[in-house]
Amino acid sequence: MKKIDKTIQLRGRYHAKIRIPKAIQNHYGGKTVHQESLKTSDPKEAEKKVRAILAVMDAHHDKHTAEESWQALARTLPSDQKALLDGAGGLSGLLKKFEAGKTALAFMEASGPTDVDPFEVEGGDVDGGEVRYIQRDGTVLRDNTPPTKILTDNVIHPDELQIQSV
C-alpha cells in the first residue's frame, strides 16, 4: 500500500491521523489528534478524504481566528456601543440581526419594480404629484421604490385592497 501523508494503515485500510491545532481542540472534545477510518484501501480516495478533513479543520481554525479578532475589537468599544452589543446578545446575536437585515434587504430589492409599464391609480395624487404603480406577481408596487406593497391576492373589488408596509 502506498503511504499517504496524515494517514496510517491498519488491516489494509487507510485511517486519518491528523494533529489538531491547539486553538480548535475544544471543537474536537479536547483531543490533540483526530483519528478516523477512511473506509478505503484506495490511495487516491484516501488522499481525497484527508483533504476534506483538513479543509473542515481549516474552516474551524479560520472561524476561531475571526471570533478572536471580533472579541478583541469588542473589548475596545466605547461603553454605549458595548451596551448595544450586549443587548443584541453578543457577537453571535449581532451577526444574526445583521444577517436578518441582509435577508430583508435582499427580499425588498428582489420585489422592486421591473421593466413593466407603470399605470396610474385613481386617486393617486400625493402632495400634488402623481403616484404611479406597477403591477407584478399579484402585487401592486409604487413606482418610486417599495415603501408600501398593496396586496391584490383574491381581490374582487378595488375597495378591498390591503396595504402592507415593507
Image (cartoon, helix red, strand yellow):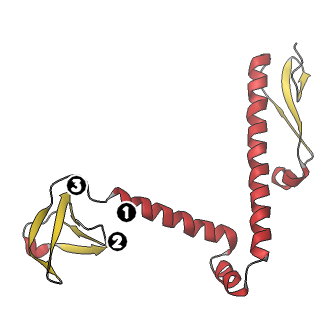
Q: Residues within 10 Å of mark 1 (few under 14, many from 20)?
A: some
Note whether residue 74 is visible.
yes
Q: Is residue 5 above or below residue 104?
A: above
Q: Is residue 5 above or below residue 107?
A: above
The residue under the point 43% across, 63% down is 105
Label of residue 137 in the image: 3
Residue 36 in the image, given as x and y percentages of width and height: 83, 34
Q: Is residue 61 above or below residue 70?
A: above
At label 3, the amino acid type is: Asp
User: Horizontal placement of 42 versus 92: left or right?
Assistant: right
Q: Is residue 45 above or below residue 68?
A: above
Note whether residue 153 is visible.
no
Disc 2 to disc 1, C-alpha distance = 8 Å
Residue 78 in the image, given as x and y percentages of width and height: 73, 83
Residue 96 in the image, given as x and y percentages of width and height: 58, 66
Which corner quadrant holds the C terminus? Answer: bottom left
Label of residue 166 in the image: 2
At label 2, the amino acid type is: Val
Label of residue 108 in the image: 1
Q: Quadrant of residue 43?
A: top right
Label of residue 135 in the image: none
Are the residues at dot 2 and dot 1 in contact (C-beta closer than 8 Å)?
Answer: yes
Instruction: Farthest residue to the front: give it.
Output: 129
